[in-house]
Amino acid sequence: MKKQSGMSWVEVLMVLAVLVIISAVAVPKLVGISNQSQQLAQSEALDAVKLAFAVSIQENQQFPDVIELSQYVDADGVLPVDRGIKLSVSGDSYTILTYSDAECRTTDRTAATTDTVRCIGDIVRN
């Protein structure tokens, strides 16, 4: 009598079921890790602009305009734009909003790159 080699259909289905269960658990965790790393990168970019703002004020003894602030930011693809500092975070384009008042009121966003910055706001995706 010949001995059969290979797997039966039941065994193949069992292996597929196990793979489906593993992927159902692993994929959301990997996506969550990716989202966490993106949020961390955004937070680091925002912190870099806030640090640049503080250093600029300390060195110049006055509030910077958007152009001056951008020169103090140590990050990839930094550009001064009318409403803040545009930069690259993990390959995506973001703007860190700047304001001409100390309370970061929505109505007082910087409107030109020559506007004086008195407050650093949130980071928004372009």
Image (cartoon, rainbow, N blue to C red):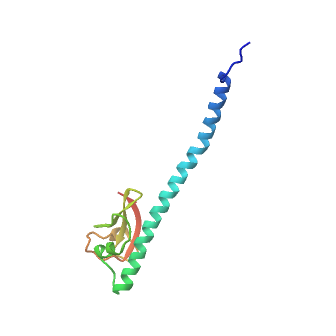
Query: Would you place residue 14 above or below residue 98 in this image?
Result: above
Whole-percent x, y for residue 79 in the image: 30, 66
Residue at image position (65%, 35%) is 18
Residue 9 image-quadrant placement: top right
Residue at image position (46%, 62%) is 41
In the visual, does 4 lie left or right of 124? right
In the visual, does 8 lie left or right of 43? right
Whole-percent x, y for residue 2 in the image: 71, 14
Residue at image position (59%, 45%) is 26
Whole-percent x, y for residue 8 in the image: 67, 22
Residue 103 image-quadrant placement: bottom left
Quarter of the picture containing the C terminus is bottom left
In this view of the protein, which residue sits in the foreground, 19 or 96? Answer: 19
In this view of the protein, which residue sits in the foreground, 114 or 27? Answer: 27
Query: Would you place residue 23 above or below residue 41 in this image?
Result: above
Count of numbered circles in the view: 0
Whole-percent x, y for residue 46 in the image: 43, 68
Residue 83 image-quadrant placement: bottom left
Point out the residue furthest to the right here.
1
Query: Would you place residue 32 above or below residue 48 in this image?
Result: above
Quarter of the picture containing the N terminus is top right
Point out the residue furthest to the top here.
1
Point out the residue furthest to the front here.
1
